[in-house]
Image (cartoon, helix red, strand yellow):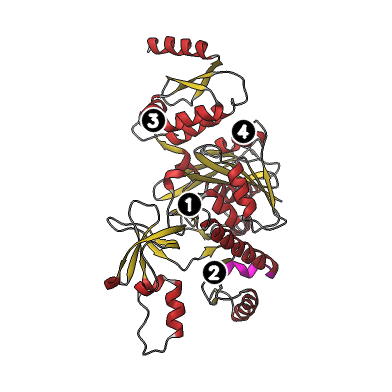
């Protein structure tokens, strides 16, 4: 059974994927890192340019999006109905200025140009891509011909009207029931989107594909063996509305922070350390550079009960499984070199490689184990799908001129939010918080709205004092308004 824990109450949205009650993957979303590509909007046609056979559509961005004639659903329909020698429909015959239109971003804005748009929406899932107006069936060419034929026939049984579907390569390992479940889920998601478009103001976002919720919908809602627990009511409703009957979705309503309640906060802290201890007493050292990641395996306290060769092989096999786990947990991508403890016998090397390949099978991100190099290192690659955990949580240390790493400003602010939100049920008027200078300046000068928002959530006045650099925000006092204000004024005079 897989469990997904979602902590969405602070500015740093995060989640944890648990398998057999162990954290195997961290999920993060940070609001300023959103890409608009693949997002769906209801926009307004602002201008039609007949000479370019294109239109400019307001989707609520700084610049209007650009929509070509051949990206309209009506163009395909009308074009298909006409004789080859008959003039093709113009954009002015299909669109009017001021009308609303549902569009999807296909390309990010560059320079003075706005985003590129299409009306031909595509909704990706784990196994398929659903095309509400695609009008065709396609199957991955990486499948053998017999499987392709079977999937093509099955998909044609499912689609209606002008629907389309693309069957991905990894569908080969899934059952017809699993694929149909995902197809039905994506169709339902599209219908929900159309209903939402009738209720919201124009322009507006209908689907944010880069959000954490969208990733959970795409990667975990399709699996009936997944349980999802979320601490944010609107997100809970969103997941519930886009799910099918039988999905396990729960709203977390305890007072304690959800990561603390499930005892996973400490595992997140451990995932930022270079050293990873093995059960046998050995350990890994994980070092990341700009070009690659190097993992060093050490026997540590493990001496074994038999000979040295036996000790080395056992440690290396244990390390192989730990490496696969840490790559997924930390979301490390690119080139990875593993310096296993030296093995002289070729059969031992093969045993360790076999273990490493076996351990990476459960990784949803494409991983390839190349083998031993001439220098005795194991080389492997893992696709760079998202930012590594380390890059999300950490930043270069300004004091040591970038040679060290410290918790990032965003991570410190998110920590402060969680600490403050934990006090929302305590019947007091004010809080005194000690923060370092970076957090202090950010909240008082650049991020004052966030501080106000925190005060509204906990219904308390928050007083900040400047503390020692590099330290995490710490709650120093909580009490009645006059008491905390007096303490704050005293601390400010001491600065």
Q: Can residue 369 be seen in this view?
A: yes
Give the residue at mark 3. Answer: 442
Provide the secondary structure element on which disc 2 rests.
loop
Image location (x, y in percent) of residue 408: 44, 35
Image location (x, y in percent) of residue 254: 67, 34
Measured Cα–Cα span from mark 3 to mark 2: 45 Å
Counting residues from the start of the chain, the first of labels 3 and 1 encountered is 1
Q: Is residue 495 magenta?
A: no
Measured Cα–Cα span from mark 3 to mark 1: 26 Å
Give the residue at mark 4. Answer: 257
Crowd rating for badge 1 (residues with CA inside 10 Å; few <14, some 14–19, many 20+): few
Q: Which of 210 and 379 is in front in this view?
A: 210
Kindly report which numbered mark, 2 or 1, lies closer to the viewer in this rendering: 2
Crowd rating for badge 4 (residues with CA inside 10 Å; few <14, some 14–19, many 20+): some
Q: Which residue is drawn at 54% across and 63% down?
A: 124
Give the side of residue 44 with respect to residue 283, left or right.
left
Magenta stretch, overall SS: helix
The image quarter containing residue 219 is bottom right
Q: Residue at x 47, y 68 (%)?
A: 120
Counting residues from the start of the chain, the first of labels 1 and 4 encountered is 4
Give the residue at mark 1. Answer: 386
The image quarter containing residue 106 is bottom left
Provide the secondary structure element on which disc 3 rests.
helix
Give the residue at mark 2. Answer: 132
Counting residues from the start of the chain, the first of labels 3 and 2 encountered is 2
């Amino acid at each position: 059974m897989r469990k997904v824990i979602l902590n969405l109450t602070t500015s740093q949205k995060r989640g944890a994927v648990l398998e057999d009650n162990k954290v195997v993957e961290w999920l993060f979303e940070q609001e300023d890192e959103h890409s608009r590509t693949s997002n769906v909007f209801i926009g307004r046609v602002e201008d039609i340019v007949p000479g370019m056979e294109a239109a400019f559509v307001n989707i609520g961005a700084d610049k209007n999006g650009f929509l070509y004639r051949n990206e309209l659903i009506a163009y395909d329909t009308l074009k298909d109905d006409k004789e080859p020698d008959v003039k093709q429909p113009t954009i002015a015959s299909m669109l009017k200025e001021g009308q609303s239109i549902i569009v999807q971003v296909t390309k990010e804005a560059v320079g003075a140009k706005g985003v590129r748009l299409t009306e031909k929406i595509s909704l990706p899932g784990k196994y398929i891509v659903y095309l509400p107006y695609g009008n065709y069936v396609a199957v991955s060419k990486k499948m053998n011909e017999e499987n392709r034929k079977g999937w093509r026939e099955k998909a044609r049984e499912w689609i209606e009207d002008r629907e389309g579907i693309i069957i991905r390569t990894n569908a080969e390992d899934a059952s017809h029931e699993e694929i149909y479940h995902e197809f039905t889920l994506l169709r339902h998601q599209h219908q929900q989107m159309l209903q939402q478009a009738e209720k919201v103001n124009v322009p507006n976002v209908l689907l944010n594909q880069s959000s954490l919720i969208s990733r959970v919908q795409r990667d975990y809602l399709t699996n009936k063996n997944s349980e999802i627990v979320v601490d944010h009511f609107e997100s809970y409703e969103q997941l519930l509305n886009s799910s099918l009957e039988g999905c396990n979705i729960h709203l977390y309503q305890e007072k304690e922070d959800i990561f603390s309640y499930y005892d996973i906060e400490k595992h997140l802290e451990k995932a930022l350390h270079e050293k990873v201890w093995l059960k046998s007493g050995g350990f890994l050292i994980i070092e990341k550079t700009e070009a690659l990641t190097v993992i060093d395996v050490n026997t540590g306290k493990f001496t074994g009960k038999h000979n040295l060769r036996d000790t080395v092989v056992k440690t290396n096999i244990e390390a192989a499984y730990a490496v696969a786990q840490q790559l997924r947990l930390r979301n490390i991508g690119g080139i990875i070199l593993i310096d296993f403890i030296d093995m002289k016998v070729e059969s031992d090397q093969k045993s360790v490689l076999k273990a490493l390949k076996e351990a990476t099978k459960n990784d949803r991100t494409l991983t390839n184990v190349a083998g031993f190099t001439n220098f005795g290192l194991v080389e492997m690659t893992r696709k760079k799908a998202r930012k590594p955990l380390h890059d999300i949580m950490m930043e270069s240390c300004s004091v040591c001129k970038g040679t060290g790493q410290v918790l990032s400003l965003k991570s410190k602010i998110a920590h402060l939010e969680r600490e403050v939100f934990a006090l929302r049920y305590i019947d007091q008027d004010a809080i005194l918080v000690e923060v370092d200078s970076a957090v202090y300046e950010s909240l008082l000068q650049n991020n004052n709205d966030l501080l106000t928002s925190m005060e509204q959530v906990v219904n308390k006045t928050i007083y900040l004092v400047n503390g020692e650099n590099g330290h995490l925000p710490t709650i120093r006092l909580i009490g009645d308004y006059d008491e905390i204000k007096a303490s704050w004024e005293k601390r400010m005079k001491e600065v």
